[in-house]
Image (cartoon, grey):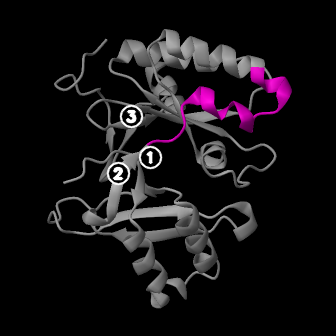
Amino acid sequence: MLSLQRHQLLRLRDSAWLRLLADTAHLSAHPSACSALTLWARHGHPVVVSRQAPGLPADTPLAAGLPAPLSLGRARIALALRADEVLFTDAFPLAAEALPTLAAPQRPGWQALCAQLDALEVPARVYGSHGWQQLTGLAYMRPGSDLDLLLPVSTPEQADAVVHRLEAAPAGLPRLDGELLWPDGAAVAWREWAAWRAGQVGALLVRRIDGVNLVEEWPCHSLQCA
């Protein structure tokens, strides 16, 4: 049984790609799906897990997907996979590895921010347009594309420190977005966390692999609280 979390990548067996490419009924609903799937199969690019339906049997297909690049219209293609079609799980690039996706003037500031996150023991990863472009070598970024960060944290204090660094990020970087990811799989948009901690909103939207819910207090039974 695979243990999945938000933004988890999956590398698929060749047999999975053959099955997906043979599914003409599925492909007919997406004009660019055949081209995208053929490209993914040829190069062995990963797919990303989607939200899983809660409370279903273990043999329920895994929900996954892939965003086609700009050349194929950025269509989002949904996939249903068997667990035995997954070769192994993978992850988006570490933040420092996304340096080539940034313009030269932005790179010193990005390197400084990456060093600050490393000092907080937060192995940040880049997903979204910057992450897919670095992973595949295909064009995903548009002018003004956000830079999405996945930020593993274990305590509210660590989350606060990360948010402080992001809010004070060097000028000139793309707009920073993304999520704080907790050990139990809960994910919170870092900007929403900042607003909640500042008392600007009364509830926090917590996302998990199988759903979302609103909380007014952080669950101290599972994590150390401030």
- 52 or 108: nearer the viewer: 108
Task: Tell me the crowding category of disc 2: few under 14, some 14 to 19, or many 20 or more residues within 10 angstroms, Cα based.
Answer: few
Q: Quadrant of the N terminus?
A: bottom left
Task: Tell me the crowding category of disc 1: few under 14, some 14 to 19, or many 20 or more residues within 10 angstroms, Cα based.
Answer: many
Q: Which residue is mark 3?
A: 203
Which portion, as a residue range, is magenta? Answer: 91-107
Q: Which residue is mark 1?
A: 7
Looking at the image, residue 198 lies above or below residue 29: above
Which amino acid lies under the numbered mark 1 shown in the image of this protein?
Answer: His
Say whether residue 168 is visible. no
Whole-percent x, y for residue 149 in the image: 55, 34
Whole-percent x, y for residue 17 in the image: 45, 72
In the visual, does 129 lie left or right of 171? left
Q: Quadrant of the C terminus?
A: top left
Say whether residue 51 is visible. yes
Would you say residue 92 sits in the magenta stretch?
A: yes
User: Magenta part mainly helix, strand or loop?
Assistant: helix
Task: Tell me the crowding category of disc 3: few under 14, some 14 to 19, or many 20 or more residues within 10 angstroms, Cα based.
Answer: some
Judged from the image, the secondary structure of the residue bearing numbered disc 1 is loop
In the visual, does 36 lie left or right of 119? right
Looking at the image, residue 121 lies above or below residue 218: above
Which amino acid lies under the numbered mark 2 shown in the image of this protein?
Answer: Phe
Can you tell which quarter of the image residue 71 is in?
bottom right
Can you tell which quarter of the image residue 75 is in?
bottom right
